[in-house]
Amino acid sequence: MWGILAALLLGAAILVLHHRDIPVEVETHRRNLIGSGMTTADRIAPVAKFVMAGSDKGSAAPAQASAIVQVKDRDGQQVYQASCVACHGTGIAGAPKVGDKGQWATRMLAGTEVLYRNALVGIQSPAGVMPAKGGNPSLSDKDVKAAVDFMVAKLN
């Protein structure tokens, strides 16, 4: 019993000693903030503003925002590495592995347009599941088709 009491007192002492300098640190930080000349509104203001292209919230801002938001076209390999490799690299959920001609054979018989459609809108079959755009709705149709073309090219 005395051991437990001693441990509790020691723990309390350590806690008090560890936290005794906190008021001094808070005061130091407060003085630094006040001395900077920034108001509270300046300190909590957003660091950026997003304006959708075509909105009527100003004339110059939409052009700037759309230029920033646009993503450069990526080639099929880049899209594959960013969005497709998780499933098509390992065969998860029945995804045909890149370069495995046996797994791709029946899919290739349907033709490239069917591959594109299945990749774009998704498909569920006994062979597996393909979510629309590989589960990445931010991909453009062009990106998805480029990734399909990259995977098909790996069969040769």
Image: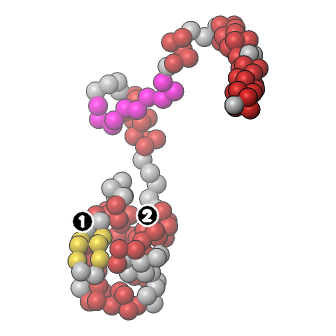
Residue 103 appears in the figure: yes
Q: Quadrant of the N terminus?
A: top right
Residue 38 lies, with reference to residue 54, above or below; the image says above
Residue 32 lies, with reference to residue 135, above or below; the image says above
Q: Residue at x 47, y 70 (%)?
A: 85
Q: On the image, numbered disc 1 is attached to which residue?
A: 121
Distance of label 1 from label 2 (alpha carbons): 15 Å
Quadrant of the image occupied by residue 59:
top left
Q: Which mark is residue 83?
A: 2
Residue 21 lies, with reference to residue 108, above or below; the image says above
Q: Nearer the viewer, residue 82 or 152?
A: 82
Dot 1 surroundings within 10 Å: few (below 14), some, or many (20 or more)? some
Q: Residue at x 44, y 81 (%)?
A: 98
Q: Position of residue 146 (x, y in %)?
A: 39, 70
The kind of residue tagged 2 is Ser
Q: Residue at x 23, y 85 (%)?
A: 110
Q: Nearer the viewer, residue 66 or 15?
A: 15
Asked whether 91 falls inside the magenta stretch, the response is: no
Task: Assign the magenta stretch its main secondary structure.
Answer: loop
Residue 6 horizontal side relative to residue 113, left or right:
right
Q: Which structural element holds mark 1?
A: helix
Dot 2 surroundings within 10 Å: few (below 14), some, or many (20 or more)? some
The kind of residue tagged 1 is Val
Residue 100 lies, with reference to residue 50, above or below; the image says below
